[in-house]
Amino acid sequence: MRKSLTAIILAATLAACGGPAEVGPGDSQLIGEWRQASQITSGGGAVELSDGVVTYHADGTSRMTAVMSLMDPGLPDTDRRYRMQADVTWTLDETVLTRSLGKITLRPETETEQSAMLARNYEAGLNQSPPVRYIIETLDADTLALLDPDTGETIRYTR
């Protein structure tokens, strides 16, 4: 009985105040172009992303471009850098940003037989990636900081 009464009082209080306050940033703050302010590494340092630009659209889609560098010292320099382009869908739930890759394409900066094969292999793997969830640490007019809870790394973007 006590729990029921507490729930009723809480519901009445929230209704009187116009409902629960929005927690976290609104979608409109995310809309627009963001430039990667820090390098992103993955695969234990095997891959670096730089020069990234993400443009979020109000319809829940976004477009991402970046330079992907393979850090394998066994590869010739000509086979290490790729231009990446990705179509992404996104949702924002309070402070959790979820991004899902729709389609990703990689183009070697220098076309060789090996770089073309590596691009196809990476594309195949990345196009099957599950959605990624980030915790928004900062979102204001000039700064977007996303915490990857799986790695503990923070990715920073600026306008």
Image (cartoon, rainbow, N blue to C red):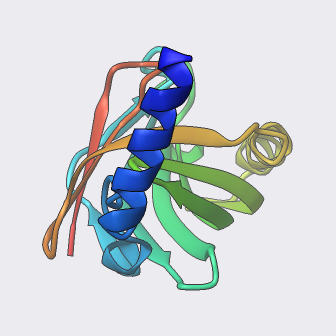
The residue lying at 35 percent from left, 60 percent from top is 22
Q: Quadrant of residue 90?
A: bottom right
Q: Quadrant of the N terminus?
A: top right
Given residues 14 and 125, the one toward you in this image is: 14
**Left-right relation of 128 to 53:** right
* 87 versus 95 height, above or below: below
Report how many numbered discs are placed on residues in the image. 0
Task: Locate residue 49, reporting x and y percent.
Answer: 42, 46
Task: Locate residue 79, reporting x and y percent.
Answer: 59, 43
Given residues 6 and 146, the one toward you in this image is: 6
Q: In which quarter of the image is residue 75?
A: top right
The residue lying at 73 percent from left, 62 percent from top is 105
Q: In which quarter of the image is the C terminus?
A: bottom left
The residue lying at 15 percent from left, 76 percent from top is 141
Q: Quadrant of residue 104?
A: bottom right
Task: Locate residue 39, reporting x and y percent.
Answer: 29, 43
**Left-right relation of 96 to 129:** left
Given residues 70 and 41, the one toward you in this image is: 41
The residue lying at 16 percent from left, 67 percent from top is 140
* 107 versus 151 height, above or below: below
